[in-house]
């Protein structure tokens, strides 16, 4: 038998074990990137964090003063005709 250099079949019954060159990781490489499922798990939490951050930023940008409070109460008074007297009493009493 001639040896062509590819060692595919040397006629020996003992075959060499395949050499593991990926650092001992025997997992399949079907995904192409490590932790691809990990990104899918974190995506909803990252989006929720960004949404809450924007909401808190907008909440901090609203300036609350007397005009804002009175206009909100007047708007609420006109939207609820049945409870308008209760809201007027709250506005007159104050804190």
Image: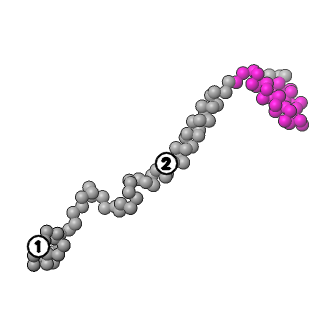
- The local secondary structure at tag 1 comes to loop
State yes or no: residue 72 in magenta.
Answer: yes
User: In the rendered image, is residue 10 in sight?
Assistant: yes
- Per the rendering, the mark at residue 50 is none
Above or below, 38 against 49 in this view is below
Quarter that holds the N terminus: bottom left
Residue sitting nearer the eye, 47 or 4: 4
Circle 1 packing at 10 Å, graded few (<14), some (14-19), many (20+), is few
Tell me what residue is drawn at x 60 percent, y 31 percent.
57
Q: Residue at x 78, y 29 (%)?
A: 72
In this figure, which residue is indicated by the disc labeled 2? 42
Q: Position of residue 38 (x, y in %)?
A: 45, 52
75 is higher (above) or lower (below) than 94: below
Residue 3 badge: 1
Q: Nearer the viewer, residue 48 or 9?
A: 9
Which quadrant of the view contains residue 7?
A: bottom left
Q: 31 or 77: which is nearer to us?
A: 31
Q: Is residue 89 magenta?
A: yes
Left or right relative to 26: residue 56: right
Residues rendered magenta in the picture: 64-91
What secondary structure characterizes most of the magenta part?
helix
- How many numbered marks appear? 2
Instruction: Check the image and report above or below for 50 versus 18.
Output: above
């Amino acid at each position: 038998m001639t040896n062509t250099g590819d060692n595919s079949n040397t006629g020996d019954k003992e075959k060499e074990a395949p050499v593991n060159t990926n650092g001992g990781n025997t997992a399949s490489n079907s995904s192409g990137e490590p932790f691809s499922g990990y990104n899918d798990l974190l995506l909803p939490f990252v989006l929720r964090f960004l949404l809450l951050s924007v909401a808190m930023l907008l909440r901090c940008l609203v300036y609350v003063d007397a005009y804002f409070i009175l206009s909100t109460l007047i708007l609420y008074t006109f939207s609820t005709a049945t409870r308008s007297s209760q809201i007027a009493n709250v506005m007159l009493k104050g804190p």
